[in-house]
Image (cartoon, rainbow, N blue to C red):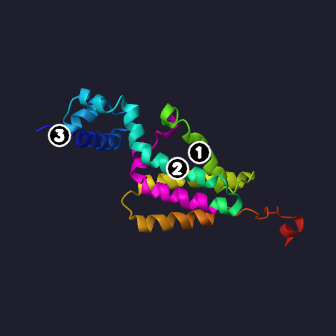
Amino acid sequence: MARAVSETHGEILAAAARRFAVTGYRGTSLQDIAREVGCSKATVLYHFANKEALLAELMAPAITVLTDLDDQLSGLTGTAAQEAAAVGFVDLAVRFRREIAVLRGEFPELLCQPAFAHIQQISERLRDALAGHSDRPGARIAALVLLAGISEACAEFVDVPEDELRPALLTLVRRAVEPVGTPLPQPPTTEDKDS
């Protein structure tokens, strides 16, 4: 008996996720995915116009959540923006850590694809919110390092339970983020050096 169309569609998505995780997006062909599902490449192409369309569907739920977070952050400033960015991004990264793991190391290339072109701008706005919209280099650097580190940690620790990973990441972010309005550290004076 032939498989239902929606069942085959889901099997192709699952096989693609597994193959991308093992051999990467670039290293996976549609034929590899078809072989894993037990169907022809033509069947894969019946469901997905190309490999990019398959990836876009795999990533669509995470991108929707990221876009919603971007909308939420648009009206916030200062510490409110920092807290919302921290909680929102940690929640997103923990929830979609398997998808992050699948694409590990291939983000720069994937951002060049039309389906993902807007992600770079959203990422920049997220970084700015986490920095509290500060122009201070330390705040901006910390925000960038935190975003990259959260993604990497979620990809690395897919086996850590969500109720342990999420609080650990939020604690780290809250320690590392420079609260808006914090005075700049003053360089030591000659009197400080002499004492």
Residue at the spot 75% in from the left edge and 51% down from the top edge = 135
Is any atom of residue 177 visible in this view?
A: no
The residue at which mark 3 appears reads as 3
Q: Are marks 2 and 1 in contact (CB under 8 Å)?
A: yes
Q: Position of residue 107 (x, y in %)?
A: 49, 40
- Residue at coordinates 45% horizontally, 64% vertically from top-left? 165
* CB atoms of marks 3 and 2 within 8 Å: no
Question: Could you tell me how far apart the alpha carbons at marks 2 and 1 are, in whole angstroms?
Answer: 8 Å
Closer to us: 11 or 86 = 11
Q: Which residue is mark 2?
A: 66
> Which residue is at the far bottom?
195
Q: Main secondary structure of the magenta part?
A: helix
Position of 16 compared to 165: left or right? left
Could you classify mark 1 by the number of other residues whose Cα lies within 10 Å: few (under 14), some (14-19), or many (20 or more)?
A: some
Q: Upstream in the sequence, badge 3 or badge 2? A: 3
Is residue 193 toward the left or the right of residue 166 in the image? right
Residue 100, magenta (yes or no): yes
x, y percentage for residue 131? Answer: 67, 55
- Residue underneath mark 1: 122
